[in-house]
Amino acid sequence: MTWGGKLFFGALGYLIGGPVGLVIGLILGHLLDRGVDRVKAFNPFRPYAPGEKEQVQDAFFTTVFSIMGHLAKADGRVSEQEIALAKAVMDRMQLSEEQRQRARELFQQGKADDFPLDEVLARFRHQTRFRKHMILVFLETLLQVALADGHLDSREEQLLLRVARGLGLPEAQFRQILAMLLAQAQFAGSAGGGAGAGAGPAQSAGPGALEQAYAVLGVSSAAGQAEIKRAYRKLMSQHHPDRLAAQGVPEEMIRVATEKSAEITRAYDTIKKARGFK
């Protein structure tokens, strides 16, 4: 708790108005201190307090798997493909059997008709202290799950848009992230594999792959060299493992998010080769 405001304004009030001034000063100081405490609590750059990071990581894990179940139920029923997809996500995250069991339980909770989505989102946003990188990784994870079958159902899209809004992201940013993830999926397919596809399009990119590479970075083919570099650095910053770890993203989620770094780098290399810059 902050006391500086109460001490300063209380003393000042007493000097100016005696006991009455002291009371008024303490009230003003309390209001100031409370505002300072709120800023400190929700400062996305402040270090975590002891034990707080673990709480945030648990909130991330809990929220992502419960909403994953809610997302799977968006079209009215949970298909075998969606169940297999959830298991694939667990495989990519290299979860232990205990973690898998908890993830399955959370997935089942999310499927309930009375699942309190808005309440869950508000609690998650509060628990993560509005850390933007964590929120972006969270939304990307859900979008990747929704896009795993190659398309986005309209009901899934509306649900994900509701999630984005609940996390404080405007629709324009949601659309931009969606377009970039679609481009990343297409770009990976054009290379004949995922992040570890070897030579990939950086060595032999056709016109279609090059356009997809621009979309991966969220820029147009008319973008200048400086704009392309800025977009690349921004995306790499958002997906850098050390930064994600500092934000409190669980290690299991970092493994998934880091795969995107490889796709982003491959897209950037493709553009550099086509444009002839370093």
Image: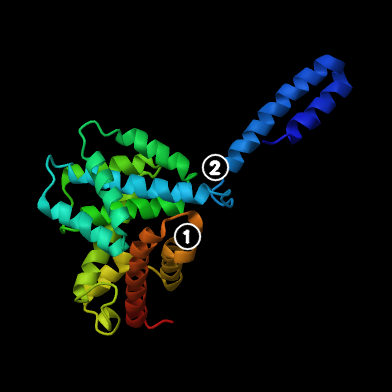
Q: Is residue 210 left or right of residue 243?
A: left
- Residue 243 to residue 158: above or below: below
Q: Position of residue 229 (x, y in %)?
A: 44, 70
Q: In the structure shown, which secondary structural element does the residue marked by tag 2 occupy?
A: loop
- Residue 179 to residue 268: above or below: above
Q: Which mark is nearer the camera, 1 or 2?
A: 1
Taking depth in this image into account, of 129 and 106 the one nearest to the observer is 106
Q: Position of residue 212 (x, y in %)?
A: 26, 68
Cα–Cα span, label 1 and label 2: 18 Å
Q: Quadrant of residue 98?
A: bottom left
The residue that label 2 is drawn on is: 42
* Residue sitting at the far top: 20
Q: Position of residue 12 (x, y in %)?
A: 84, 27
Q: Residue at x 26, y 80 (%)?
A: 200
Asked if residue 147 shows in the view, the reply is: no
Q: In the structure shown, which secondary structural element does the residue marked by tag 1 occupy?
A: helix
Q: Looking at the rendering, in which quadrant would you find the C terminus?
A: bottom left
Q: Residue at x 53, y 48 (%)?
A: 51
- Residue 167 to residue 205: above or below: above
Q: Quadrant of residue 91?
A: bottom left
The dot on residue 236 is none
Circles 1 and 2: CB atoms closer than 8 Å: no
Q: Residue at x 25, y 78 (%)?
A: 197
**Disc 2 residue crowd, few under 14, some 14–19, many 20+, Cα 10 Å:** some
Q: Position of residue 76 (x, y in %)?
A: 12, 39
The residue that label 1 is drawn on is: 245
**Disc 1 residue crowd, few under 14, some 14–19, many 20+, Cα 10 Å:** some
Looking at numbered disc 1 in the image, what kind of residue is underneath it?
A: Ala
Taking depth in this image into account, of 161 and 83 the one nearest to the observer is 83
